[in-house]
Amino acid sequence: MADMPSGFWSGWIIALTLSSLAGVAWLVWSIYYGRDLQEESEVEPVWDEDLEEGHNPPPLWWFWMLFGALIFTLVYIMLFPGLGNYSGVLNWSQGKRVADSYEDFQANFAEARAEVLNMSLVEIQNDLDLMDTAERLFRRECSACHGPDGRGQANMFPNLHDVDWQWGASAEQIEQSIRGGRNANMIAWQAILGDEGVEQVADYVVNLRQGVDESHPGRAMFQQNCVACHGMDGTGNPALGAPNLTDNIWLYGGDMDAVRETLQQGRFGVMPAFGERLDDMQIKLLIALLVR
């Protein structure tokens, strides 16, 4: 919540608000009681022979309605924030209301949430109500990227139903991904490998899943530049977020064009951290939903 205005701007808001209310009050009062309507000029314009300009004021109930609205406004800005940094007699604010609601929530559900935290993942998975809660939580927090069914989308966000996860699929690894987020760092190799090298390494990687002859021209460059992350056999390293290159699970695509683009431009996917957005119980529910 933004801080209340202070100093000059607080005074300016107060002056502007009060002067506006005073102006509206004067205008309403002057229309109804500020002049004697019977003393209007006797010369009145006439149109179409019998169409004359009238001087009848609006109905009096309009005056009382507007006057009542002004009184309500004055009472409101006295009770609630509305005049610069003046917080009002009731000292009410949206932030305070949210904080109070959160305290009430914690007081009412702290025990039940503690019970969930003490449950094993298997116990949570066997509880249909808790799993329904986990699915709603996933749809709210995760489906924008991973899709409502968790199968990924747009060749940018991974499928959470497959068996090969870039950063690992154990409960501990999933928790780390949710809490701290992940930042991929597949650098661009175009400047290092050159056009010919990119073609050779891309061809080597595309055919790695089928087994590649040791005489392949991309093998030496792969071993020189790629094994530090992906390993000698190309099976990857979840600790580094280096994916397995020997299976059919490819986030950005496993055909020649996609692998070539990856080598040329690099990949820098980001999984945002949810450690401050979600509490421990919510994270545990998501882990129970995602772990295989």
Image (spheres, helix red, strand yellow):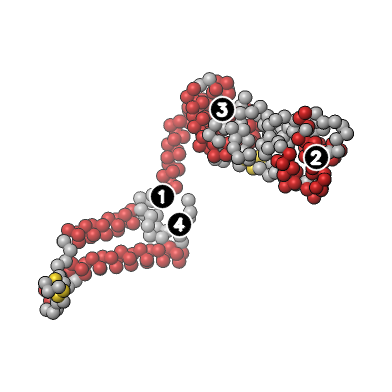
Q: CA distance from mark 1 to mark 3?
A: 37 Å
Dot 2: element: helix
Q: Earlier in the sequence, mark 3 or mark 2?
A: 2
Give the number of the mark in front: 4 or 2: 2
Compared to residue 102, the image places residue 289 above or below, namely above
Q: Position of residue 109 (x, y in %)?
A: 45, 30
- Is residue 217 at least partly visible in the picture? yes
Say whether disc 1 or disc 3 marks the residue closer to the N-terminus: 1
Residue type at the position of mark 4: Met
> Of label 4 and label 2, which has the lower sequence position?
4
Residue at the location (46% across, 34% down)? 106
Horizontal side, residue 78 vs residue 31: left or right: right
SS class of the residue under badge 1?
A: loop
Which residue does the numbered mark 4 point to in the structure image?
4
245 or 74, which is in the foreground?
245
Q: Which residue is mark 3?
A: 289
Q: Label 1 sits on what residue type?
A: Ser
Q: Nearer the viewer, residue 143 or 180?
A: 143
The residue that label 1 is drawn on is: 93
Name which of mark 3 and mark 4 comes first in the sequence.
4
Q: Position of residue 155 (x, y in %)?
A: 63, 39
Q: Quadrant of the C terminus?
A: top right
Residue that appears at 19% across and 71% down = 34
Q: CA distance from mark 4 to mark 1?
A: 10 Å
Q: Are marks 4 and 2 in contact (CB under 8 Å)?
A: no
